[in-house]
Amino acid sequence: MSIRETRDLIGQGMSLSEVAEQRGISETTIRSHLERLVQEGGQVDLDHLMPPDDRRINIELAFRELGDARLTPVRDMLGEGYTWDELAVVRLALRQEQAVG
């Protein structure tokens, strides 16, 4: 139930922080809901959460080089100018693409 509620709010165009605030839970929890949803084969419209193309491409390249198991090595590589949300959203999009095949 909780994960579906998160998915629905994201689907309405809300940001991770807006969903966290509305639901009274942390952004980390929101990200973990989306991770679980994708792992279980669900689809989430992430377009409105994506960073600009140049940043998205840099993040994708870093994940391809370092793997997507953890965000920290990618952030260490790219620097603190990249947010945890940007990294998490791009990783989710990559995982969704892999799941679709």
Image: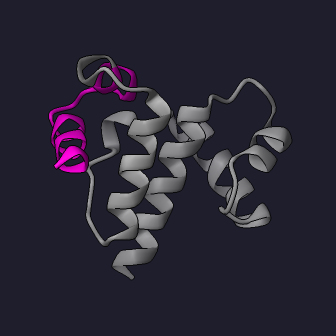
Residue 50 visible from this viewpoint: no
Q: What secondary structure predominates along the stretch shown in magenta?
A: helix
Closer-to-camera residue (70/47)? 70
* Range drawn in magenta: 1-20
Q: Is residue 87 left or right of residue 51?
A: right
Closer-to-camera residue (61/14)? 14
Dividing the picture into quarters, in which one does residue 36 lie? bottom left
Q: Is residue 11 magenta?
A: yes
Q: Quadrant of the C terminus?
A: bottom left
Residue 91 visible from this viewpoint: yes
Q: Is residue 42 magenta?
A: no
Q: Is residue 31 left or right of residue 64?
A: left
The residue at the point 32 percent across, 35 percent down is 48
The residue at the point 63 percent across, 28 percent down is 83
Dividing the picture into quarters, in which one does residue 65 lie? bottom right
Rendered location of residue 55, percent (x, y): 61, 37
The residue at the point 84 percent across, 40 percent down is 76
Rendered location of residue 67, percent (x, y): 72, 66
Q: Is residue 12 left or right of residue 53?
A: left
The image's colour scheme reads: one colour
Q: Is residue 44 left or right of residue 38?
A: left
